[in-house]
Amino acid sequence: MRRLLIVHGPNLNLLGERQPEIYGRATLAELDEELRQFTAKSHAEALCFQSNHEGALIDFLHEQRREACGLVINPGALTHYSYALRDAIAAINLPAVEVHLSDIHQREPFRRQSVVSEVCLEQIAGLGWDSYRRGVEVILGHLAVQELRYVLQERPEVDHAYRSCVRILKRDFPKYDWTGIYLVEGNELVLHNYIGAPTPHARIPVGQGICGAAVAEAQTIIVPDVHADARYLACSLETKSEIVVPIRGQRMYGEIDIDSHTRDAFWQNDRKILEEMAGNLARYLDLSVS
Ligand code: CA2
């Protein structure tokens, strides 16, 4: 199983004991348990580690560098001055995300600087536990994009390429309750393959509904609340939010369409990974389809 490292630096063992107005009331053990469950839903294992010692954190990263495929790290105050930790994150060569419970940019000036952010894919701060959950999503998204790229390099049948994209996304993102690909055929979008509940919308005229609008406008559409959007073609009562990403190369090939049963399920990371996947599919199709 893919292993993600969740690493916490100095003083985070005290979570829940003091300063609840900044760091919340929950303990580190509760946070780690939540992250293990969250990660398991994406068929990955979270290995959690905390230390108050810079060297122990570095040793842990070295030990795990060949066993793990990503790192979510809250370096605590080491964020602001530890070049040794920064070098270790760079050296292990794993995709890494820096996270903070509090918004370090709205606190004392010394907290605004991070010496590790440059060796991380992203810094996520100020969202409490969600900073960590989003960190996990960034790593999983990065790995999903890489996996599809490997599949496409093998130059599979076009059909297999579309199916792989849907399979990878549905496996790694449990919040993607319905994931499918529509292809442009004339003036219609025709459902190619999907994973989720059966849909009555196997053919959608270009321009109609959110799916049709994304292709007509050639841009990603995120709808945080489908019931507040007049364009939504209702098919499932459970669907609360939707993201549609066009697959556009030398021509418009189709789109990736995802529904979630959670309202406001999609954030910038979803847009980024789905647009990268759609872009890779489009480049592959430009070469494969005459
Ligand atoms: O906001 C964060 O997650 C921090 O990384 C937490 C670090 C702090 O030095 C960073 O500037 C921001 C420190 C964690 C201190 O944790 C405590 C937890 C409970 C009680 C006292 C301290």
Image (cartoon, rainbow, N blue to C red):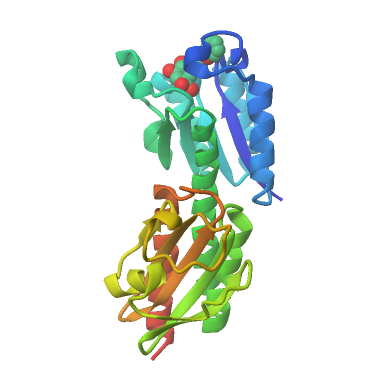
Image x and y of residue 142, in percent: 49, 52
Number of numbered discs on residues? 0
- Is residue 41 shown above or below 166? above
The reply, left or right, for residue 36 in relation to residue 187 is right
Q: Nearer the viewer, residue 194 or 166?
A: 194
Left or right of 246 on screen, residue 57: right
Identify the residue at image location x=33%, y=20%: 106
Q: Nearer the viewer, residue 211 or 160?
A: 211
Q: Position of residue 253 (x, y in %)?
A: 39, 80
User: Is residue 134 shown above or below 290?
Assistant: above
Classify 14 as above or below 97. Answer: above
Residue depicted at 60% across the width and 47% down the height: 69
Residue 184 rendering spot, x and y as whole percentages? 40, 83
Most foreground residue, 236 or 188 = 236
Task: Name which residue lies at 51% across and 54% down.
Answer: 240
Q: Position of residue 89 (x, y in %)?
A: 49, 34
Quadrant position of residue 219: bottom left
Question: Based on the displayed image, in which of its 4 quarters is residue 147 positioned?
Answer: bottom right
Residue drawn at 46 percent across, 30 percent down: 127
Residue 77 visible, this angle: no
Q: Is residue 244 visible?
A: yes
Residue lying at the far left in this picture: please name it: 217
